[in-house]
Amino acid sequence: MRRRSNVGASLLAKAAVAIAQGQALPPTGTTPPVFRL
């Protein structure tokens, strides 16, 4: 249970970073694997 929550938190963190990068950088037309989820 804790491992799953940790993995979920890491995924959310990666998603947040991807969103931040997407907002900071102009859209290149390619979506990162994390953003596809």
Image (tube, rainbow, N blue to C red):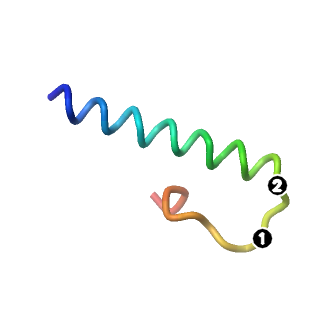
Q: Give the secondary structure at mark 1.
A: loop
Tell me the tag on residue 16: none
Q: Quadrant of the N terminus?
A: top left
Q: How many marks?
A: 2
Residue that carries the numbered disc 2 in the rendered image: 25
Q: Position of residue 14 (x, y in %)?
A: 52, 44
- At x 51%, y 36%, the residue is 13
Q: Is mark 1 in CB contact (under 8 Å) with mark 2?
A: yes
Instruction: Pinpoint residue 10: horizontal percent, then vertical percent.
Output: 41, 37
In the image, what residue type sits under mark 2?
Leu
User: Residue at horizontal 22%, vertical 36%?
Assistant: 4
Q: Position of residue 19 (x, y in %)?
A: 66, 46
Q: Which mark is residue 28?
A: 1
Q: Residues within 10 Å of mark 1 (few under 14, many from 20)?
A: few
Percent x, y of residue 9:
39, 32
Q: Establish if 33 lies above or below 18.
A: below
